[in-house]
Amino acid sequence: MTREMYHIKPGVAHPLGAVPDAHGVNFSLFSKHATSVELLLFAFTIWGLSHDDDLHVMLNMEQMALDFEIPSLQEKRWLKVIDTDLPSPMDFVEPGREMVIPGGICHVSERSVVVLISG
């Protein structure tokens, strides 16, 4: 795949870290000796309006399973609707069959994606 397929654009050098803006996320890193960077973990939340569901997406491209901290919700709970570690067709859950994610941690298997929706 080429850079154009991902619509990667030059970013800005500061501030360091991952900084979201209206067009995506700017990743700014510094290393005196690095020759490349791989993004292996990424998570983001799309907050719905008062009557809409919230969405939280976690991508784990590491070679080991990891626990992701998830944002807390008031008067709602997180429901797992997609887990690409599960075999098809169990990877996408039918409405009404979602698994509740208790607490503030969600387990994400190696090289997989989990999507949560508030409910």
Image (cartoon, rainbow, N blue to C red):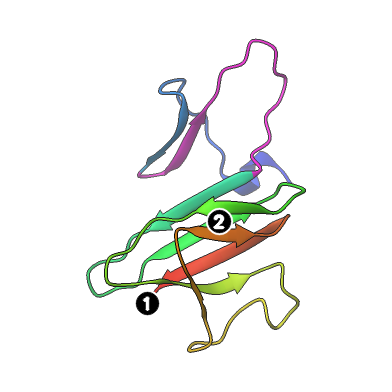
Highlighted range, magenta: 22-40
Horizontal and vertical percent for residue 1? 74, 47
Residue 47 placement, left or right of 89: left
Q: Given the current orientation, which residue lies at the most extreme top position?
A: 32
Q: What element carries label 2?
A: strand
Main secondary structure of the magenta stretch: loop
Q: Confirm whether the magenta stretch covers residue 39.
A: yes
Where residue 5 sits in the image (x, y, percent)?
A: 64, 48
Q: In which quarter of the image is residue 103?
A: bottom left
Helix, strand or loop under label 1: loop
Mark 1 lies on residue: 119
Say which amino acid is labelled 2.
Met
Q: In the image, what residue occupies the spot 77% across and 48% down? A: 63
Taking 13 as reference, is 76 above or below it? Answer: below
At x 45%, y 58%, the residue is 104
| Vertical comparison of 20 with 64: above or below | above
Mark nearer the N terminus (2 vs 1): 2
Q: Which residue in the protein does label 2 denote?
A: 58
Q: Camera-side residue: 87 or 25?
A: 87
Dot 1 crowding, Cα within 10 Å, few <14, some 14–19, many 20+: some
